[in-house]
Structures are given as C-alpha cells and as structure tokens.
C-alpha cells in the first residue's frame, strides 16, 4: 500500500547556477506576496473612499486586478521551486527508480514545451502593447504594456525554474517529483 509522499523543495546540489535560479524564484515569491499585500491595501482604501467618504473610485479596481494577475504570474517560479503546483502523483508514487526519473524528465520537458509556446505569445502580446502604445479604455487609462509585462516575465522565469529542475534531475542532485525511494 502506498503512503503519502514526502515531497520537498527542489534541491540545488551546491551548483551556483541552480542556487541563483532558486534565489531568483524566491525573490519572485516575495514580489508576488508584496503585490498581493498592495492589492489588499488598495481594496481597503477603495472601500473607505466609496462607503465612508461617499466618493467614486477611478483607478483602484483596475489596479487590484492587474496586481493580482501579476502576483499570480510572478509567483509561478517560486511555487515551482517549492513543488507547490497542484499535481496528481499516483503514478510517480507507484513507480520507482529509473522509471520515475524518466517520467519526471518527460513531464518537465512537456511542461517546458507548453510554457515556451505561452511565453512566445505572451511576449508577442506585450510587444504589441508596447509598440502600439495601447492604453486601457478606462478613465485611469494606464499604459497596458506595464501590466502585460507580467505575462512574459512570469512565464519566462517559470521556464527558467523548470529548466533548472530538469538540469538538477539530470545531474542527480534532485529527486524525481521530490519523492524519496522507499
């Protein structure tokens, strides 16, 4: 009978590049947390302005939306480094040794392929917004390249963390799916 897995954060094995990428992912996690905090504070300010001061709000709702989307995207590499993404691990728990490593490698390569396609189109979308000077159609009218930057930045850093995880798996400094062989 299988027991619950004891997964752990990705290991760097002392390799400088892997440590730098993990550090960058951690910084992304902190930035993401600060963006969530800022969105909460802006929401509180918006509630105060609307219901206590009885005035309308202009920029708050849009800013909160952009901050939450940005926090989600910039948090991707951090969550990957902690192995915090939702996954189904029935098969990895049941298989052992080399088969588990091969499965982990295939999963990482497939994920990197999908994220690369998303990154390409995210960069293209951001570049259009930058090049054409797109602005939001609201009263606030911020330049859209600023919030759109979270797309290529978040997926690019996520791809970098996935590549670091793949390299760590190939070098043998990290376990497949973070699972220990029993």
Image (spheres, rainbow, N blue to C red):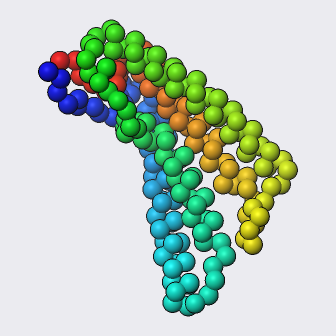
Q: Relative to 59, is 128 above or below?
A: above
Position of the C terminus by quadrant? top left
Residue 142 at what x, y percent from top left?
A: 73, 64
Q: Residue at x 46, y 64 (%)?
A: 37
Residue 69 at what x, y percent from top left?
A: 56, 53
Furthest residue toward bottom: 53
Q: Residue at x 49, y 53 (%)?
A: 32
Furthest residue toward right: 132
Q: Residue at x 43, y 32 (%)?
A: 19
Image quadrant of residue 13?
A: top left
Q: Residue at x 58, y 90 (%)?
A: 54
Residue 162 in sight from this viewpoint: yes
Position of the N terminus by quadrant? top left
Q: Nearer the viewer, residue 12 or 40?
A: 40
Q: Nearer the viewer, residue 18 or 47?
A: 47
Q: Relative to 137, is 147 above or below?
A: above
Residue 147 at what x, y percent from top left?
A: 66, 54
Disc count in the image?
Answer: 0
In the rendered structure, the answer to whether residue 69 lies left or right of residue 22 reads: right
Q: Nearer the viewer, residue 164 or 129?
A: 129
């Amino acid at each position: 009978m299988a027991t619950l897995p004891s997964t752990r954060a990705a290991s760097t094995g002392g390799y400088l590049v892997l440590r730098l990428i993990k550090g960058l992912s951690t910084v992304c996690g902190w930035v993401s947390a600060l963006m969530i905090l800022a969105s909460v504070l802006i929401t509180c300010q918006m509630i105060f302005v609307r219901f206590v001061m009885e005035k309308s709000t202009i920029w708050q709702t849009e800013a909160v939306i952009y901050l939450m989307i940005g926090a989600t995207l910039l948090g991707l590499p951090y969550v990957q480094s902690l192995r915090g993404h939702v996954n189904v691990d029935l098969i990895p728990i049941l298989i052992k040794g080399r088969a588990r490593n091969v499965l982990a490698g295939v999963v990482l390569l497939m994920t990197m392929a999908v994220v690369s396609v998303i990154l390409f189109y995210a960069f293209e979308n951001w570049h259009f917004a930058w090049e054409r000077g797109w602005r939001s159609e609201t009263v606030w009218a911020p330049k859209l390249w600023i919030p759109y930057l979270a797309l290529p930045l978040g997926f690019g850093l996520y791809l970098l963390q996935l590549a670091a995880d793949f390299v760590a798996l190939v070098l043998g400094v990290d376990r497949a799916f973070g699972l220990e062989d029993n």
